[in-house]
Image (cartoon, rainbow, N blue to C red):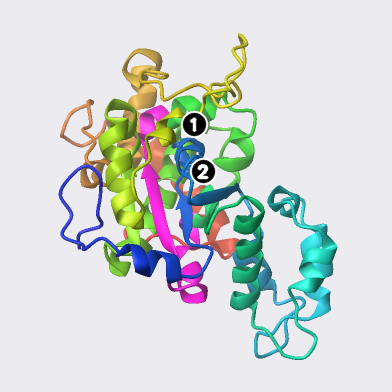
């Protein structure tokens, strides 16, 4: 099915402007494997005069799964407000406990999805914009649940070459807590990252493709940094909003150059070539990554460089052993795995 990927033509019809304005918030979710460029997409969209995108809520599907503060039929109670206020991420929306109480009618029951919509409506209003979205990379693994809860919300899935994702993950202080959450980081962070990428991208595409091109859109990080204006224009077409040249100037007035800080922390403009796996990764690391991700890499448009034949037995055996541990931990913790795992 056509996913509306920016790397090729899409047959999906773009939403009409009138439809955009009438749709519920949250209007969109920016998702993807960590270190793939989700923050860049968030900043581009948040610079649009119509769209406000909050950075990483993570509580939207979690509170619904936990059911704390909800009645059996899914209506919100005051207990949910206490839970939300305890969430360390809620303050990013700039909402107070009075805001949360005020959005809960005293004379009529309100469902969780409607309450979430009202929170995002208020966030948009506080930002002086009509549309609100959320950038939470991990939602790439919760898209099916989010779509069931909020069927009109659109998903922007950014995908980056797993070899560059690995470079970034290895340099990141939270890499062990992210790609390493399945118990394999200490032994092999490279293969752990490759498995994490395969899990995230695989689940995202598996959930997203059936939704169709009006709801799900893929962006290649490499296309975004090489051709930002055309890639962002296609993204705006998918979202049913006009392209605004200020989007690619998101960094103006915010850039703070400081050696040793990440490009994200420095608020750099779109910058090609921040990482180059071909020059920075050892051949053995590349081989392990491609052994894990090769078929999925090909599906999303990346070429392997270690040959088209079977991997060396020593590499294959090592990868399978790490994957077995990764898989066992995922299943014990009831984490979903892609059908092609």
Q: Alpha-carbon neighbours of circle 2 within 10 Å: few (<14), some, or many (≥20)?
A: many
Q: Position of residue 164 (x, y in %)?
A: 39, 28
Q: Position of residue 179 (x, y in %)?
A: 54, 41
**Vertical order, 19 against 329 (above or below):** below
For the residues labelled 1 and 2, say whether their Cβ atoms are less than 8 Å apart: yes
Look at mark 1 in the image and give the residue it sits on: 250
Q: Quadrant of the N terminus?
A: bottom left
In this picture, residue 27 sits left or right of residue 224: right
Q: Position of residue 40 (x, y in %)?
A: 47, 35
Look at mark 2 in the image and give the residue it sits on: 46
Please tell me which residue is depicted at 60% across the width and 66% down the height of the picture. 61
Task: Name which quarter of the figure residue 152 lies in.
Answer: bottom left
Is residue 315 visible in this depiction of the protein?
Answer: no
**Vertical order, 108 against 190 (above or below):** below
Q: Position of residue 181 (x, y in %)?
A: 60, 46
Q: Nearer the viewer, residue 135 or 168?
A: 135
Which is more N-terminal, label 2 or label 1?
2
Which portion, as a residue range, is magenta? 140-164
Please tell me which residue is depicted at 15% across the width and 34% down the height of the picture. 308
**Vertical order, 150 against 162 (above or below):** below
Please tell me which residue is depicted at 61% across the width and 25% down the height of the picture. 265
Tag 2 secondary structure: helix
Q: Nearer the viewer, residue 321 or 45?
A: 45
């Amino acid at each position: 099915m056509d996913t509306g990927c920016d790397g090729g033509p899409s047959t999906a019809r773009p939403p009409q402007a009138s439809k955009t304005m009438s749709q519920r918030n949250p209007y969109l979710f920016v998702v993807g494997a960590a270190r793939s460029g989700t923050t860049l997409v968030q900043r581009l969209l948040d610079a649009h005069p119509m769209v406000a995108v909050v950075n990483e809520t993570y509580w939207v599907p979690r509170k619904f799964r936990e059911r704390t503060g909800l009645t059996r039929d899914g209506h919100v109670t005051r207990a949910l407000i206490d839970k939300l206020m305890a969430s360390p991420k809620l303050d990013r929306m700039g909402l107070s406990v009075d805001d949360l109480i005020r959005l809960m009618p005293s004379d009529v029951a309100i469902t969780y999805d409607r309450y979430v919509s009202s929170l995002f409506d208020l966030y948009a209003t506080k930002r002086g914009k009509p549309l609100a979205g959320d950038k939470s990379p991990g939602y790439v693994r919760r898209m099916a649940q989010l779509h069931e809860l909020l069927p009109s919300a659109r998903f922007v899935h950014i995908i980056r070459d797993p070899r560059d994702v690995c470079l970034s993950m290895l340099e990141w202080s939270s890499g062990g807590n992210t790609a390493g959450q399945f118990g394999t980081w200490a032994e092999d962070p490279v293969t752990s990252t490759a498995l994490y990428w395969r899990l995230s991208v695989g689940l995202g595409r598996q959930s997203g493709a059936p939704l169709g091109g009006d709801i799900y859109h893929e962006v290649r990080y490499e296309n975004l940094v090489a051709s930002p204006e055309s890639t962002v224009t296609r993204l705006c077409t998918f979202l049913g909003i006009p392209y605004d040249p200020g989007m690619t100037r998101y960094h103006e007035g915010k850039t703070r150059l400081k050696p040793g800080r990440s490009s994200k922390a420095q608020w750099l403009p779109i910058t090609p070539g921040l990482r180059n796996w071909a020059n920075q990764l050892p051949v053995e690391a590349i081989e392990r990554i491609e052994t894990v991700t090769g078929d999925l890499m090909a599906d999303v448009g990346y070429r392997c460089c270690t040959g088209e034949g079977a991997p060396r037995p020593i590499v294959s055996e090592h990868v399978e052993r790490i994957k077995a541990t990764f898989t066992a931990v995922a299943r014990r913790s009831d984490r979903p795995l892609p059908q092609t795992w």
